[in-house]
Image (cartoon, helix red, strand yellow):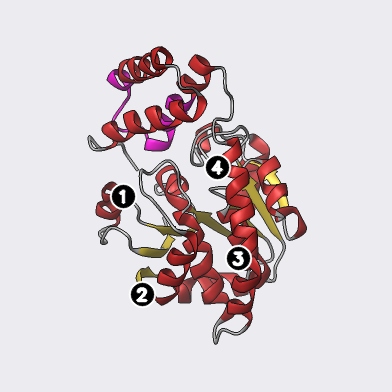
Amino acid sequence: MKTYLDCIPCFMQQALRAGRMATSDENKLKQILDETAEMVKTISMQATPAETGAKVYQIVSKVTGVEDPYKEIKQQHILETNAIYPELEKIVANADDPLLTAIKIAIAGNVIDLGVNKAFDIVRDVQTILKQDFAIFDYSAFKKQLAKSENILYLGDNVGESVFDILLIKELKKPVKYAVRSTPIINDATREDAIASGIDQVAEIVDSGCKSPGIILSQSAPAFLKIFDTADLVISKGQGNFEGLSGCNRQVFFLLKAKCRIISNHLGVAEGSVILKEHTF
């Protein structure tokens, strides 16, 4: 997915939001905005938003000296989602279609996105999404691929929603590798975050090698690329991973909520839509 003009103000907003998580020094915040503006002048509009997003957070870390501005809030999200996990587990267990319900709950977790300037309420959004129809619903293709898969690669996204991912991973009933970011960026899950969420109890955690808020294959570790190429089923969570992989040359199933106008327009759906999309090539 390419960068659109409307992505540029979003980069500036993300820079300021992340900067304020790291420092209250107005001079440093101004420097972050100045450097982000200079960087934006030179970006290619053919680059993915996730690639530019990585540069934004590199600027924030460099100026503030804080590697993980969202560390405390990530820990808070894990506590909050763990608190409602038992109730979600009951919902899946009592559902007519536990797999589909687990997919919906995993997507509901995707609302926990600090890269998008939207308020969220975890319980409210879970309840809404469980009742919401899919705008794109490639569930039959998903089930068909799952049935013949021996190994699965699950591309993680945000901390907190990784707790929701556990429910879906259990319902897949196949060996799963769970890919994380190699360094902290926004509130995306690193290995440390995934372990804190309990992912290591249901899947093998693998490092994607990516330092961007989304999987960029050209920036991924060779070991990860081998897993990506050979997995029978690839499940991709969230907008950042969609931005990076929407043009890749293998089948991928994207699970996300379209949380911004750019993504919704790109997919041809209304903003706020729930998506289960099969990507083929």
Which amino acid type corresponds to the residue marked 3 in the rendered image? Ile
Considering the image in quadrants, where does the N terminus appear? top left
Q: Of callouts 3 and 4, which one flags the residue occurring earlier in the amino acid sequence?
A: 3
Q: Earlier in the sequence, mark 1 or mark 2?
A: 2
Quarter of the image for residue 121 reads: bottom left
- Indicate whether 214 appears above or below 82: above
**Which residue is the site of mark 2?**
133
Where residue 181 appears, x then y in whole percent?
60, 39
Cα separation, mark 4 vs mark 1, equals: 18 Å
> On residue 260, which mark appears?
1
Residue at numbered disc 3: 84
**Lower position in the chain sequence, tag 2 or tag 4:** 2
According to the image, label 4 marks what residue? 188
Q: CA distance from mark 3 to mark 4?
A: 20 Å
Q: Nearer the viewer, residue 75 or 280?
A: 75
Which tag is nearer the camera, tag 3 or tag 1? 3
Q: Is residue 200 visible?
A: yes
Q: Secondary structure at mark 3?
A: helix
Q: Nearer the viewer, mark 3 or mark 4?
A: 3
Tell me the crowding category of disc 4: few under 14, some 14 to 19, or many 20 or more residues within 10 angstroms, Cα based.
Answer: many
Q: Residue at x 50, y 34 (%)?
A: 212
Q: Is residue 63 magenta?
A: no
Q: Point out the tag, 2 or 3, that comes first from the N-terminus.
A: 3
Residue 146, horizontal then vertical, whole percent: 59, 70
Which mark sits nearer the N-terminus, 3 or 1? 3
Label 1 near label 3: C-beta < 8 Å?
no
* Disc 1 element: loop
Query: Magenta segment range?
Result: 40-57
Q: Is residue 207 above or below residue 107?
A: above
Q: Amino acid at mark 1?
A: Cys
C-alpha span from label 2 to label 3? 23 Å
